[in-house]
Amino acid sequence: MRLLILTTLVVATYAGLADKKEKKSIPKPAPRTCYGDVNDLKPTGRKKGGVAASNKMIQADMASLTKYRECFQKVADKFCIQASILGAIASRESRGGALLDKTKGFGDKGNAWGIMQCDIRYSGLNCTSVPWNSCAHIEMMTGQLIIPFMKQVKKKHRKWPAAKQLQGGVAAYNFGVKNVKSWAGLDSGSTGNDYSNDVIARAKWLHLKKWN
């Protein structure tokens, strides 16, 4: 009887240790901050209405954006960028698709394609090669435009901290890296003269809703 009890205790002990080891080996989710963290930024929001106006806009877009949340999360994981940034860009560009021609996927008077608005004239991408409302579209715009722009801004403004380089990349998505000249005048010349500050404000709101 004593031998049976001892054997049982030994087996239970090893099983417990194995469980702990297995739990420790489970990798933690990636922080997705390879290009900076929105939490380190203090955006001014929209030119008219500030951060409150940006928050109001993103809240209004949540029904549209949530349809693609899984896509944003997967692409964020692949490129190590916060999903909140991608969702916020889609919100600013097309209201999460709500502004687009639902049968054709075009916006900007037919010059841009998809929820993240691939510019048919100037992006250099085959914009319509993927569905306008697909994970493939989000991945193409992130991998072939957003990430390269952030890398170029990082190279151009080496002394900027990562978070500022991140916002600079967002601005470049709107009007090109050549126009990202200074932090003080970052959005000067962008759409509405508030593009990156509006997007980052929306991203911070999304981040609070666990779009990390």
Image (cartoon, grey):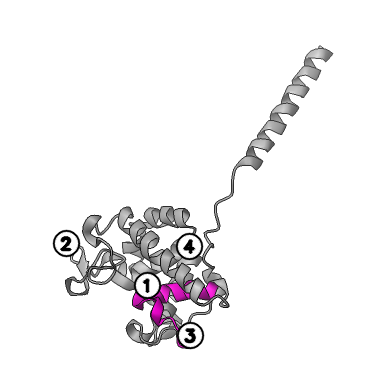
Residue 65 screen position, x and y as percent: 34, 62
**Chief secondary structure of the magenta portion:** helix
Q: Assess whether mark 1 and mark 4 are in contact (beta carbons under 8 angstroms).
A: no
Q: Residue at x 59, y 46 (%)?
A: 27
Query: Which label is found at residue 104?
Result: 2
Using residue 34 as the reference point, say whether residue 136 is left or right of it: left
The residue identified by callout 1 is 173
Q: Are marks 1 and 2 in contact (CB under 8 Å)?
A: no
- Distance in Å between CA atoms under marks 4 and 1: 16 Å
Nearer to the camera, 62 or 46:
46
Sequence-wise, the earlier of marks 4 and 1 is 4
Residue range in magenta is 163-185
Residue 204 seen by the camera: yes
Q: Residues within 10 Å of mark 2 (few under 14, many from 20)?
A: few
Which circle, 4 or 1, is nearer the viewer? 1
Judge whether 208 appears above or below 168 on screen: above
- Residues under labels 3 and 2: Cα distance? 38 Å
Q: Residues within 10 Å of mark 4 (few under 14, many from 20)?
A: many
Q: Earlier in the sequence, mark 4 or mark 3?
A: 4
Report, in whole angstroms, how far the alpha carbon at label 1 lies from the one at label 3: 16 Å
Q: Is residue 105 left or right of residue 77?
A: left
Q: Residue at x 43, y 84 (%)?
A: 50
- Secondary-structure class at tag 3: loop
Q: Residue at x 50, y 72 (%)?
A: 155
The amino acid at mark 2 is: Lys
Q: Looking at the picture, which amino acid does disc 1 mark?
A: Tyr
Furthest toward the right, the residue is: 2
Q: Magenta span has 171?
A: yes
Residue designated by label 3:
182
Residue 180 in the image, given as x and y percentages of width and height: 43, 81
Q: Which of the two labelled residues, at mark 2 and mark 4, occupies the earlier sequence position?
A: 4
